Image (spheres, grey):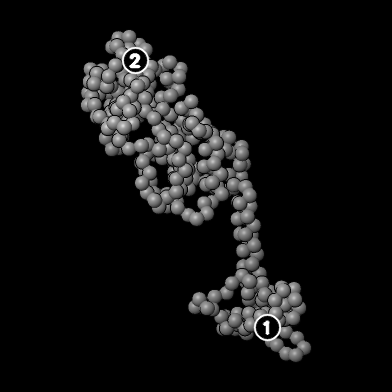
Amino acid sequence: MTQSDSIDIRSLHFFMSVYEMQNFSQVARREGVSASMISRTIHQLEDSLGQQLFYRNTRAITPTDAGRLFFEHALKITEQFEQAQKQLQDRKQEPSGLVRINAPVFFGQYHIAPWLAGLSARYPKLAIELNQTDEFIDPLRENTDIIFRIGPLRDSSYHARIFGQQIYHLGAAPEYLKTHGKLTAPEQLVDHQCLVYKGFEGANRWLARQSANQTWTHYPIEPKLVSNNAQSLLTTAISGMGIVLFPDWLMGQALKQGQLIELLPDYELSITTHAQHIAAIYPNVRHPPLNVRAVIDYFSEIYGSPLYWQK
C-alpha cells in the first residue's frame, strides 16, 4: 500500500458512520462536512482495500460482505485507538506506569533511595525501577528513562536538568589529627596517610587551587589505603585511619556531625579540572514524557537551591 493509499482514523470513523446510518447526507450533516467528501472517502477506502464496501442505489446504501468484515476490524481498531488516547491523556494528567532510573551507586543510596517513598506517595500510579552503576550508560540502549549523573556535560544528544555543582572536601577524624597534626598546605599531603578511591578509570588524583582564576595543581600522594568502595573509605576515615577527599553529598553529614574535620577550607579541591555537575539526563525529545518531567521536578524540589547537603 502506498502513502497515498494509507487509511487514517478519520476515514475509519466516516466509514463506520456510513455503515451505521446507511446515508451519506446524514453522516455529512453529523460530521459537519459535505456529502461529496463522505462519498469520496468511501471510494478511497475501497480503492485502498481493493474491495467494494457498499452497494449503492437511489434508495439505500447497504454494506457488502467485505464491508461487514471491514467494519468488525474497524471497530476494534478505533476502540484500541480511543483507549490509547485515553491512557495517554491520563498520563498527561497524572504520572503512571513504569519509570526507569539509573544512578551512581552511592549517590543513589544517599540521595535518591531515601526520597522514593515520597515520590511514590505523591504519584501512587507510578512504578519505579532503580538501577545503580558508576559507569555511564546510553539511555536508549539500556532502556532507561532518567540517568542521574555527576560530571561534565558534553553530549548534546541528551537533555540535562542541572541540580547543582559537586563540591569536594578534604577531611579526617579528630583522633587522626591529634596524632598526625592538621594540614596547613596541600604540599603536606605527602606526609599524611591518605585514603584514596579507585574507580574503573583508576585511582583518583587529588587537585587543589586557592581561587577559581588559578590553575589546578596535582599533589602526588602515597596512599595508605586504596579501595573501590567509597563507603568503606569513609568508614575507615571516621575511625581515624587517614584523610579522604570526597564530594559534599557523600561526606557532608560526617562533617556536620563532627565525625570528620574539614581540612584546607581555604582551598578548592577536586579530582578533575572539569566542573562536576549533578544532573538528570534524558533522551533529547521534543516532548519529554510526563513521568520523566514529574520525577525530575520532584528531585529538583527535594534537592533545592542550594542543594540541601550544601546548606
Q: Residue 175 carries which label?
A: none
Amino acid type assigned to the residue bearing label 2 in the image: Gly
Q: Which residue lies furthest to the front in this view?
A: 213
Decide: is 299 above or below 253: below
Which residue shows up at 54% across the image and 46% down it? 293
Q: Which residue lies furthest to the top in this view?
A: 178
Return the residue at label 1: 36
**Which class describes the residues within 10 Å of circle 2: few (<14), some (14-19), or many (20+)?**
some
First in sequence: mark 1 or mark 2? 1
Decide: is 274 above or below 86: above
Classify residue 233 by image quadrant.
top left
Secondary structure beneath disc 2?
loop
Which residue shows up at 75% across the image and 73% down it? 30
Which residue shows up at 63% across the image and 52% down it? 90
**Which class describes the residues within 10 Å of circle 1: few (<14), some (14-19), or many (20+)?**
few
Amino acid type assigned to the residue bearing label 1 in the image: Ser
Label 1, label 2: how far apart the Cα atoms are: 88 Å
